[in-house]
Image (tube, grey):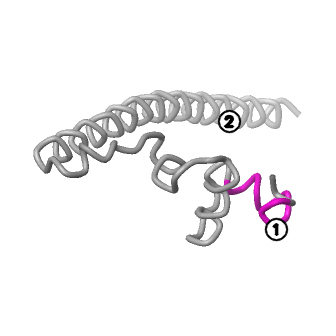
Amino acid sequence: MAEELGVGRTSYVAFESGHVRLFHQLVGRMADRLGLTPEELLFGTRPDEGLLRDQAALDEWKRATVTEYEQRLAALQEKLDAKNQIIETQQMTIRSLNESNQYLISQLRKNE
């Protein structure tokens, strides 16, 4: 795919993994190659033509899409918070072990 799009493999992997944002020209080429619209490539779905003409239905589709992404974001935030809690706990353990080591070293020096 990288070769067909005219970009390096490393760049393509960075796009695919979300580490680097796609630029407009590449989105169009990638969508064409995959037989998708740019909207389908970026957002996963595209409203049908009837929906595009029905403003109320389009607004509901947009709300549903935003809600879906907000839910995904909230789930990811929960995971991040849990990981941060683990990190804080491990940092406290490291500090405690460091203090214990310092105390033991000082006691060993007294006995010398």
Relative vertical location of residue 28 with respect to residue 72 in this rendering, above or below: below
Q: Is residue 2 rendered magenta in the image?
A: no
Relative vertical location of residue 58 with respect to residue 6 in this rendering, above or below: above
Q: Earlier in the sequence, mark 2 or mark 1?
A: 1
Q: Position of residue 108 (x, y in %)?
A: 82, 30
Q: Residue at x 45, y 53 (%)?
A: 39
Neighbour tally class for label 2: few under 14, some 14-19, many 20 plus, Cα within 10 Å: few
Relative vertical location of residue 9 with respect to residue 59 in this rendering, above or below: below
**What amino acid does circle 2 point to?**
Asn
Tell which of 86 and 111 is nearer to you: 86
The quadrant the C terminus occupies is top right
Q: Which mark identifies residue 105?
A: none
Q: Residue at x 54, y 32 (%)?
A: 92
Tell which of 33 and 20 is nearer to you: 33
In-image side of 27 versus 59 (left or right): right
Q: Quadrant of residue 10?
A: bottom right
Q: Secondary structure at mark 1?
A: loop
* Residue range corresponding to the magenta coloring: 4-15
Q: Position of residue 88 (x, y in %)?
A: 51, 34
Q: Residue at x 83, y 29 (%)?
A: 111
Q: Which mark identifies residue 6?
A: 1
Residue highlighted by disc 2: 98
Neighbour tally class for label 1: few under 14, some 14-19, many 20 plus, Cα within 10 Å: few
In-image side of 70 versus 102 (left or right): left
Tell which of 29 and 110 is nearer to you: 29
